[in-house]
Image (spheres, rainbow, N blue to C red):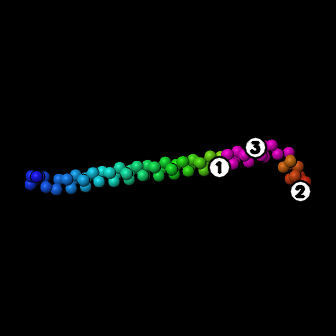
Amino acid sequence: MFKKNEDGAALVLVLLLLLVGTVLVTALATTARNHINIAVHEEGMSKAFYNADSGVEFVRVNIDDIISEIKNRG
């Protein structure tokens, strides 16, 4: 069926395709993991920003009460 110089060619081809597939899947998994890490980091940064902004707004709205309470203590 096969000529002598073609013996094992299918095995080599399958192994080569498996290698290429493994490299592609590894690259895809690494890229997906990096994107997930970036999204988690961005979410944390957004939460930190909005918490800080909320604190600033709280102080801005209640500054008179805060100052009078500090004066009453001292």
Q: Return the mark for residue 57.
A: 3
Tag count: 3
Q: Which residue is mark 1?
A: 48
Q: Which residue is mark 2?
A: 73
Residue 53 lies, in percent from the top left, at 70, 45
Type of amino acid at the residue the image marks with label 3? Glu
| Residue 25 is one of the magenta-drawn residues | no
Horizontally, residue 53 falls left or right of residue 7, namely right
Q: Could you tell me how far apart the alpha carbons at marks 2 and 3 are, in whole angstroms?
A: 24 Å
Horizontally, residue 14 falls left or right of residue 43, namely left
Crowdedness near tag 3: few (<14), some (14–19) or many (≥20) residues, C-alpha within 10 Å = few
The image quadrant of residue 8 is bottom left
State the residue at coordinates (25%, 55%).
15
Q: Which range of residues does the magenta coloring cover?
A: 50-64
Residue 7 lies, in percent from the top left, at 13, 55
Q: Secondary structure at mark 3?
A: helix
State the residue at coordinates (57%, 47%).
42
Type of amino acid at the residue the image marks with label 2? Arg
